[in-house]
Amino acid sequence: MNSNELTAFETFSSYLKSYFFERDLKKTVKFLGDISGFGTGVDEVVPPADMRELFKRDIEQSPSKIIVKNDKFSHRLISDDVVIVWGTLDISSEIDGFPYEINNLRLSILLLRRNDSWKIEHKHISLPFIEQEEDEAYPLKKLEEQNAVLSELVEIRTSELKHKNEELRIANAEKDKLMSIVAHDLRSPFNAILGYSQILNEELAQSGKEEWAEYAENLDKTARDTYSLLENLLSWSRSHISGYEPAKEIVDFPQIAKITIDLASQLAQRKNIKIENRLPDKLSLNCDPFMIRTVLRNLLSNAIKFTEPGGKVILESEQVENGGVVFTISDDGVGIPEEKLDTLFVIDAKKSSKGTLGEEGTGLGLSLCNEFVSKHGGGIWVESTVGKGSTFKFSLSNQDVLSQ
């Protein structure tokens, strides 16, 4: 490329930059001589003054920068004062708020040198004029029509989504209603079964009929294990109801603890495990009693489950510096291997372990504890040594502790 070709091509490149990217009419015009052009939409050959008006209209109708890609240009020096440049390019922009794209756009430009300055004298650009109307540099009306069709489709899809969402809302409400009915209708007969099985177990144990006493004991154990599973399943389902948050109220925590300990005593007595209640006599909490009772019940039953017969489980609490309280349930049982500690509070039926007397588990309990404590803004953690026992702790913030 000689110096004349280079200077002419630099002029062409500067023109492309000002016209396509910068969309600057003044900078564009300075590269133009007595320019005429072909193929500018519905307009054909026009005189120089009208050609400048076409540039002005073009830039006014598309003020956004035009992105050029896949541009391929060739050039030829016709004489020292004449250079022709031709090639193809893809452009995309936003025209009057609508995305617009032209691929394989053909462009040819004739540059003449006048008074040692290169000027563009002729331009041919192949715009898709068949889509344009008079006085349009771009197919604005066609773009508006396409946008109207798209808007209508969006409205239809939006209406369909609203209808589907309403159907899902109704179905979810029915599911929640069903769970409430199931919870109520299953708990009542289970409480009756538990009551009768306990009476049967106690009476036969005193009758001296060892075989019957064993059957009664197994019946009582199965009923209690199944009831525990039911409680956890219903608790888990309730916790996953959309928008379910703690229903806080002022509760007497020692009373909740006493009820929970009394319910667990049957299993503890069967294993000759002593439960030491070192909780304070007075402690008022602002909490969801159902959630906190579920946490306490699961941690206490786990401690009994993994403690050998003749062992001990301790419940206690301490106030921390920020005014909150930390509850502790500790045992001298089998302990937990270190590799299981990181995933202990994640739902996984496969990691559920049998207790010291073969008690089955669901893998739900500790996950529920974690969810319910988290919903109160607290935390839960464990310290454990294999062969020495485990200590589970959970905290409630000072906002939930009213008095101690």
Image (tube, rainbow, N blue to C red):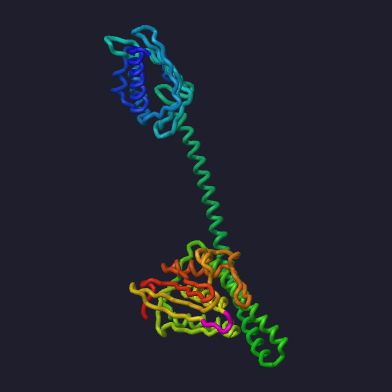
Tell me if residue 373 comes above or below residue 222 in the rendering.
above
| Range of magenta residues | 308-312
Res 265 → quadrant: bottom right
- Work out whether residue 369 can be spotted: yes
The quarter of the picture where the C terminus appears is: bottom left
Tell me if residue 242 comes above or below residue 359 in the rendering.
above
The quarter of the picture where the N terminus appears is: top left
Out of 119 and 73, give the one closest to the viewer: 73
Residue 187 position in % (x across, y down):
59, 76
- Work out whether residue 185 can be spotted: no
Res 93 → quadrant: top left
The majority secondary structure of the magenta stretch comes to: loop
Q: Is residue 41 magenta?
A: no
Residue 238 position in % (x across, y down):
53, 67
Residue 266 position in % (x across, y down):
58, 84
Q: Is residue 311 magenta?
A: yes
Q: Going by the picture, which residue comes out furthest to the front?
A: 387
Q: Going by the picture, which residue comes out furthest to the left?
A: 115
Residue 379 position in % (x across, y down):
43, 68
Out of 157 and 348, give the one closest to the viewer: 348
Tell me if residue 226 comes above or below residue 273 in the rendering.
above
Q: Going by the picture, which residue comes out furthest to the top?
A: 79
Residue appearing at x 62%, y 78% in the figure: 357
The mark tally for this picture is 0
Name the side, left or right, on which 350 lies relative to 53: right
